[in-house]
Amino acid sequence: MLDYIHEHFNQPFSLTGLANHTLLSRESCCRIFKQMTGMTISQYMTEYRVMRSLPYLADGKYSIAEVSALCGFSSQSRFAAAFRSKMGCNPNQYLHSNFDIIRNS
């Protein structure tokens, strides 16, 4: 399941696609995933996408909207909310703090 999620994180997520890939029912996928990770599939996917966004933001070549799309978020506002929840700041603040660290090095 994790391999499938990691390979498809930047695409719209389909629980049916995951279930078909693993040859399990949708309900079994959800139950087993929660037992294995302590998170729902949705929680894991959101956290994984946020973590995958960090190198793009640190690179400085992409706008926040581009990073959002590259990491599979359906909108920039969903990305910002998920990022803020996980990282404690919004993507723009992270972007600027990262530039400050590089500039001061």
Image: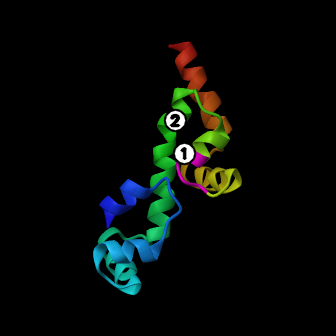
Query: Could you tell me if residue 34 is visible in this image?
Result: no
Give the quarter of the figure containing the N terminus: bottom left
Residue on which the image places disc 1? 70
User: Which residue is painted at 35% across and 77% down in the image?
Assistant: 20
User: Which residue is painted at 42% across and 72% down in the image?
Assistant: 17
Q: Position of residue 13 (x, y in %)?
A: 50, 65
103 left or right, relative to 44: right
The image shows residue 28, relative to residue 94, as above or below, that is: below
Main secondary structure found in the magenta portion: loop
User: Mark on residue 56?
Assistant: 2
User: Which residue is painted at 40% across and 86% down in the image?
Assistant: 27
The front one of 46 and 71 is: 71
Farthest right residue?
A: 77
First in residue order: circle 2 vs circle 1: 2
The image shows residue 12, relative to residue 69, as above or below, that is: below
Q: Position of residue 67 (x, y in %)?
A: 58, 41
Tag 1: amino acid: Leu
Q: Position of residue 18 (x, y in %)?
A: 38, 72
Tag 2: amino acid: Tyr
The image shows residue 58, relative to residue 17, as above or below, that is: above
Name the colour scheme.
rainbow
Disc 2 vs disc 1: Cβ atoms closer than 8 Å?
yes
